[in-house]
Amino acid sequence: MGRLVIAGLEQICTEMSCSKKTLYKWIRQRQFPAFKLDGIWRCRPKDVDTWLERQRRTATSRASGKRNIAS
């Protein structure tokens, strides 16, 4: 197994250039891969990468007028 890296939401917000409010909204809607560890929201960067790729595919499908059935 590779080295496990867990990032806090503040770090993710900085990397993604979004607000904590936006990130909490994504978590509430169960779309963003985050979990609480000792009462602090965390996420694994590789899960975020997967989530971002899925969002990109969805956006591309919408822009081209096609449904993304692979998700």
Image: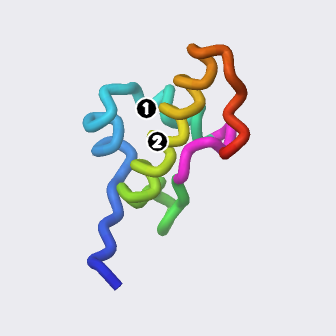
What is the span of residues highlighted in magenta in the rendered image? 28-33
Mark 1 is surrounded, within 10 Å at the Cα level, by few (under 14), some (14 to 19) or many (20 or more) other residues, namely some
Helix, strand or loop status at disc 1: helix
Image quarter for residue 2?
bottom left
Magenta-colored segment: predominant secondary structure:
loop
Marks 1 and 2, Cα distance to the nearest angstrom? 20 Å
Q: Is residue 26 above or below residue 62?
A: below
**Quick one: 65 or 56, which is closer to the camera?**
65
Give amino acid for label 2.
Glu
**Quick one: 8 or 70, which is closer to the camera?**
70
Which residue is at 67% across, 45% downward?
Answer: 70
Mark 2 is surrounded, within 10 Å at the Cα level, by few (under 14), some (14 to 19) or many (20 or more) other residues, namely few
User: Percent from the top left, x then y, of residue 44?
Assistant: 40, 60
Which residue is at 46% across, 41% downward?
Answer: 53
**Numbered mark located on residue 20 in the image:** 1
Quadrant of the snapshot with the C terminus = top right
Image quarter for residue 63?
top right
Q: Is residue 26 above or below residue 4?
A: above
Residue designated by label 2? 53
Helix, strand or loop status at disc 2: helix
Question: Per the image, is 21 magenta?
Answer: no
Q: How many labels sit on residues?
A: 2
Q: Which numbered mark, 1 or 2, is in the foreground of this view?
A: 2
Image quarter for residue 29?
top right
Which residue is at 48% across, 32% downward?
Answer: 56
On screen, residue 37 versus residue 45, left or right, reads: right
Which residue is at 37% across, 26% downward?
Answer: 18
Give amino acid for label 1.
Lys
